[in-house]
Image (cartoon, helix red, strand yellow):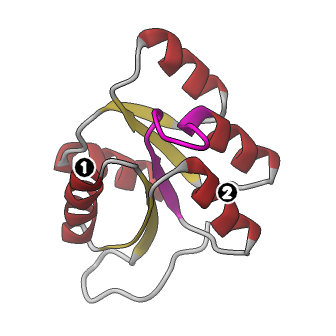
Amino acid sequence: MARGGSSSSSNPKISALIVEDHRPTSMLHEAILKRNNMETKVVNNGKHAVELHSKGERFDVIFMDYNMPEMNGAQATKKLREMGVRSMIVGVTSCTDFERVEFMAAGLDKCFKKGLTRAMVEEVLQKLKE
């Protein structure tokens, strides 16, 4: 996967898309990712994430909520995978076990219970290095 930008530390800048409709949660996730030297972009539903990729934008990792208006996380993840998007897609959600199974089957690489923590981000960063 291509990495975005250069870095002032030993870790290269990683580009991250946050797909989350609850503004306080997206702000928290964005702050955690930026503290981990990641470049971020935020959209508030799965449809917007698909549209960005349709326009040629690419990210190293996508942090995706499940419950969102217009297009939920499972629908967006499935569509992105059908479009050939190879970014790591990480679910960050409070969905039910049934929804989590659907979400994983749509093409997630990993799924965490909401809210995102520094330890979760470090796990994702380690996986991206593999």
What residue is at 27 percent from the left and 43 percent from the top? Answer: 120
SS for tag 1? Answer: helix
**Residue named by callout 1:** 25
Residue type, mark 1 in image: Thr
Q: Position of residue 18 (x, y in %)?
A: 42, 57
In the image: residue 108, left or right of residue 115? right
Residue type, mark 2 in image: Val
**Residue named by callout 2:** 50
What residue is at 25 percent from the left and 49 percent from the top? Answer: 25
Q: Earlier in the sequence, mark 1 or mark 2?
A: 1
Residue 51, picture quadrant: bottom right
Please state the extent of the stretch shown in magenta in the rendering.
Answer: 60-74
Res. 129 mark? none
Looking at the image, is 73 positioned above or below residue 80? above
Residue 49, picture quadrant: bottom right
SS for tag 2? Answer: helix
Looking at the image, is 18 positioned above or below residue 8? above
Query: How many numbered marks, from 0 up?
Result: 2
